[in-house]
Structure formats: structure tokens, C-alpha cells
Image: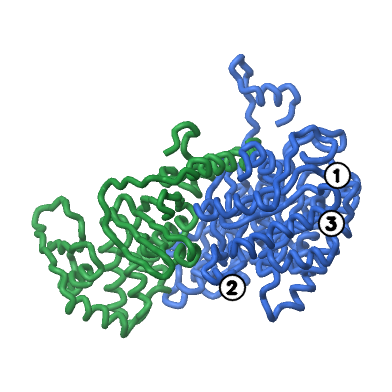
Chain colours: A green, B blue
Amino acid sequence: MNVYRTDGSEEGFYTAAFRACTDKDCIVTCAADIQLAAGMQILEVRTDARCSERVKAFLRKYDERALGELSLLLRRGCCTKEMTALGYLRLIVEKRAPVRNMLAHPAVLEAVSEIKKVTQEAHRFKGFLRFMECENGIWYAPFEPDNDILTLIVPHFARRFADQPFAIHDVARQKAALCHGTDRCFIRTDARVDIPLSDNEQLLQTLWREYYDAANIAQRPHEKQMKGYMPARYWKYLPEKQPFKEHR
Amino acid sequence: MIDATRLKILTESAKYDVSCSSSGSARANKEHGLGNASIDGICHSFTPDGRCISLLKILLSNRCIYNCLYCPNRADADVPRASASPEELCELVIAFYRRNYIEGLFLSSAVERSPDHTMERMTDTIIRLRKVYNFNGYIHLKGIPGADKQLVSRAARYADRMSYNIELPSERSLHLLAPQKSRDSVLQPMLRLAEEKRDDAKRRGFLPAGQTTQMIVGASPETDAQILRLSEALYRKFSLKRVYYSAYVPAVRHPALPDTCTGLLREHRLYQADWLLRFYGFTAEEIAPEGENLPEEYDPKCAWALRNMQFFPVEVNSAPLEALLRVPGIGAMGAYRILKARRYAALDFADLAKMRIVLKRAKHFITCSGKFCGSDNATAIKTLLSLDVPEKKHEQLSLFSLPELAESAGSGQL
């Protein structure tokens, strides 16, 4: 069995899908460390714009919306995302028609549920992202999402905070978006960044923390529901979830 | 900036208002100002009681001239009092909003001096936000019963949503527990705003997110049937977006009020019934027969189905949407998914399970291509589906038992 290894980009995936077109029983992945079983061999896929364009042209012809869906799928933070995308893509190729409503088909079910995870996380971070005011007047928001959603949430914040220059930093993936008015750019960052905060910042975080505690109705505890809506892995950058004394 | 002590007082006084939604308005960010509203609403945090924080929910003042028995801020109550100036509140809203802590402001107030005076200060606050700070975020404004109608109408032009709290489901209870408020002082302004919104429909700028209201459940003896009929009438006549129900929490002790919390399950059942009214095409009459409470052991849709077994089973592969929506266990999303999927292939029970349609209840009420998987004995279904109402916990008290538990053992109430 062949394992097609891509560079993790969208183009890389389409190239691999093109190469593996007739290779029905194969694995496409971008994982660097894969455990090979007996009889498996790795084929490194060099991203090729011409190949990926042919697959995209096919999709544009039969199901334009699928391009967007596959792009969402490939943002998943798990190593099987390429296989899910490939299953969905192959079904479109087989049917030569949109398949998104075939909700009882395993490939579609898988794709729909994985896409949902990406869009849901993007929606959640519209609420859970926290900005801090820096000394130089820029608003800085670090976060560590499960999926690669940085570019998905930037337009929302650019519309909302049209009058404040801000940076959103995906700490785990080491990339950031910088926005000021209509100007936007995406950069790679170091593993550690040092951001001096404004004098006011600490006070506001404390006020917010006070507000959060006061808004709770202690007679009606329902911690399980809170954690369901706001999973503990997101708490790292929420000021209201930090112990009172040791504010970052 | 407002200090922590006053923030705490004004927040704690506001937190019993359950409305939290920030949806329904698509206000755009104008002229490079600050903020916009998101049509679906966004939750920014969740408190340990499981409720979301979407808007900065705060009172302008908790100094009240009214004496509503159920209210922790009533005039007679011995609680710390505070008020904030419109400018202080605006600063706080902007500072929180820029940090993405909140989606906007939910402004309410106790009636300080007079309804007009209070309404004026609230209006001043939101106009300042909109005009001075060029703030386009979501604003939910509480109406003060008895305030001048011109004033209310003016305020409504700057808010996304307004709400008047009905508080108690019947005029009699309102008279008993909130003697200074009358049913008309709450309903009249709601009706006027609804009419004004209708007349203004073309401009779409007037209260884009409509009106809501809130009722306290369990402080007075009304049944669920009565409450749901009232909600239904409110949705029909006042075009309300939401009716919120708040299970009574004894924040104050008074002989006219019950000592115990109303169960959260009752509140939950009311919300389920409310959804059936708004999205599933049920009427209050169907959900709760006159004079009855909703059963606790089944959800309201399941209870309706068990009373109306003649409608079932429904054939999944051919039934119209309205019939699918009435099947216990199939929600609105599930029903739409079934409609889409069955165009490609006939669905069987395994397909439904894969599509995450919960079959625990549904299987007794549906057939898949003529096949039936449930039990056809109505009594058996009832037993199978009844929720295990959590057994009241009894515990041998020891020195280390929690004080609340010891208290409940003493009073015999949970």
C-alpha cells in the first residue's frame, strides 16, 4: 500500500489526490511521523500547481461549493483530515455531482461532522478570543485553537474593530494576523513573543474577573454545562478563568 | 472608571434577569466606528452556573422606590446600594468591548426617584454610547414600567432590543407580590413598541432584534398550562422574539413567598414547551391541557405523543416535515437532515443512527420503509421512556456534612 505524504498545504493535498487518482487503497497524510505496517511505502508528494489546478477545475465544474468545504476540512487539527477530504472528493468524482445532501453516506457524514468541528470552533473563538491592550496601543490576542482557524476569524474582528489596530496570534502554530483598518497581513512568529502591556490592562482584567464572579448565581451550580460550552482547554487565555492573585 | 465594589453590587443586582441572547440584529459598523452586531449572537463566556455571558448585564442603579416582594433590590431590603453615572458605564462598556469580553450592553435599572427620571438616565447612557463613542455593538435596554411613552420611543431608536418584564404570569399574583406595578403598565408599552415596529417595518432600523419578556416561575401558584397560554398570546399579539422563564430562587424571605427554589427541571420543561410553540407548530392547548403542569418525567413533545398515539407510527421515508417534527426525539435539525438524505436513498434505522438521530424515543413512533423497531404496547413505552427523576438524596448527617444539607434535613425541604 502506498502512503502519499504531502506538505500539509491545500495544494499539496490536491496534488496527492491527483497522483493517487487510480490508487484506490492508499493513504494520504501530512503527518511527519507515521508508523508503517508491512508492505507500506512512503511516496513524498511534491506540490505541483498544475496537478492541483486540474482537480480544482474538475470540482469547479461539478460542485463549486465543495472547494470551500474541502478547504475547511483541511484545517482540521487531526492527522486523518486528508483521508476524510479524500473520501469526500472521491465520492464527488464518482457521482459527478454535489453529494453534500447524501447524509446517510459514511464519507459525507464524516466530512460534514469534521467541517462542523472547524466552523464551530471558529464561531466559538469569536466569543472566547481575548484582546489585551499593549503599551504601543496595539491590541494583542493570543489563542491556541484545535484547528487552523486564524484566517476564518480575522474578517469578523476586522469588521468589528475597524478603529483599533490588532494582532491575533495562533501561539501553537506560530502564526499571526496583523490588522489595521483595511490593511491585513499574515506572518510567522517565534515560539515565544514578549508583549509589554499597557498600565490599564491589569486593572481591566481584574474588573472583568470581578464581573464574572458577580454574574454567577451560586445557588444554581451547573459546572458540567459550563465546561460543555466552554471546554477547559480554552481557559488558558481567558482572564476570568485565571486565579485572582497571579494574573499574567 | 467604575470601581470594583460598585461593579459588584450593580452586577449582582442584575444577574437574575435571564435574558442573555445577543442575536437578531445585524447592525453594521458605521464610519470606522467600534463594533457591530452579529445576527446569530455570540457567547463570550460561561459562568459556573452554566449560563452564558454575552452582554454586560448591569444596573444603572439599584436604589429602588418600589417594593416588589420577590426582588432582592426592593426598597425595604437591607442590601448595599450603588449607582453609576452614564459616563462611567459607557467607559466600562467600551473597555470590555475592545477586549472582546462582551457582545454589548444589557442595561437595566431599579426605579430611582421616578420611572421617568430612571428612563431618562438609561436613554442618556445608550445615546452617549452610540453618538459619542460611535459604538455599534448590541444594546438590550430594559423598559421601565410607567415611563413616559415619548421617552421610551426615543430610547428604542438607539437600542437593538427592548424588554419589559411581565414578572408574574397573572394579574392577581402581580398585584399581590408587586403592588406598585400593574399589568397595563407593562403590557401597554410593549404593545406600543410592537405597533411602532410594525409601522416602521420599511426602515428596519427600529428595534431590529424586537422585544422579549421574562416571567418568574414558581413564586406564584399559576400552572404551566396558564403560563404557556400567556406565552402563546404574547408571541401572537405582541410579536415577541422570546419569553424567558426564570425558576424562582428565594433571594428574600417573606410569608407570601415560597421558601424553596423551583426545580430547574420545571424551568427546563417550560423552555422545551416554548420551543415547541415557536419552531414545531404546536399550540399551547396541545402541549399542556387546561389547568395542568407539564409532566416532569417526559419532555413535553413525548408527553403529547403518548397522549396521541393515534398519530403514530410515522413513516420516515415519506412523512411530511410537519409530521416528522412531531416525533419525539427528532428535532428541527434532524427533520431537515432526514428530508435531504431520503431523496438519495431509503433510510433504515442504522442510517438514522449514523445521522445522529436519537432513536431512544423516536423508534417507538416511526417506521423505516414499513419496518417498526419499537414497542407497540403503549404502557411499555411509557415505562421505557420515563426519565428517572433523580432520587432525592438522603444522607446520614455527620459532622462534616455540608451546611446546606444539614439545613435541608432540618426543614425537610430540598
Q: Is residue A8 left or right of residue B414?
A: left
Q: Are marks 1 and 2 on the same chain?
A: yes
Q: Neighbour class for label 3 at 10 Å: few (<14), some, many (≥20)?
A: some
Q: Given the image, what chain letter belongs to the residue carrying mark 2? A: B
Which image quadrant: the N terminus of chain B? Answer: top right
Q: Which residue is mark 2?
A: B321
Secondary structure beneath label 3: helix
Q: Quadrant of residue A237?
A: top left
Identify the amino acid type marked 3: Asp
Marks 3/1: CA–CA distance: 13 Å
Label whose residue precedes the other's in the sequence (3 or 1) = 1
Say which of marks 3 and 2 sits in front. 3
Which image quadrant: the C terminus of chain B? Answer: top right
Say which of marks 1 and 2 sits in front. 1
Q: Is residue B253 left or right of residue B353?
A: right
Mark 1 vs 2: CB contact within 8 A: no
Q: Which residue is mark 1?
A: B65
The residue lying toward the viewer, choosing from A235 and B149, is B149
Mark 3 vs 1: CB contact within 8 A: no
- Looking at the picture, how far across and down is residue B262, in whole percent? 73, 41
Identify the amino acid type marked 2: Leu
Q: Quadrant of residue A47?
A: bottom left
Q: Are marks 3 and 2 on the same chain?
A: yes
Q: Which mark is residue B116?
A: 3
Q: Which mark is residue A9?
A: none
The residue lying toward the viewer, choosing from B236 and A50, is A50
| Figure check: A212 above or below B203 | above
- Looking at the picture, how far across and down is residue A73, in whole percent? 33, 65
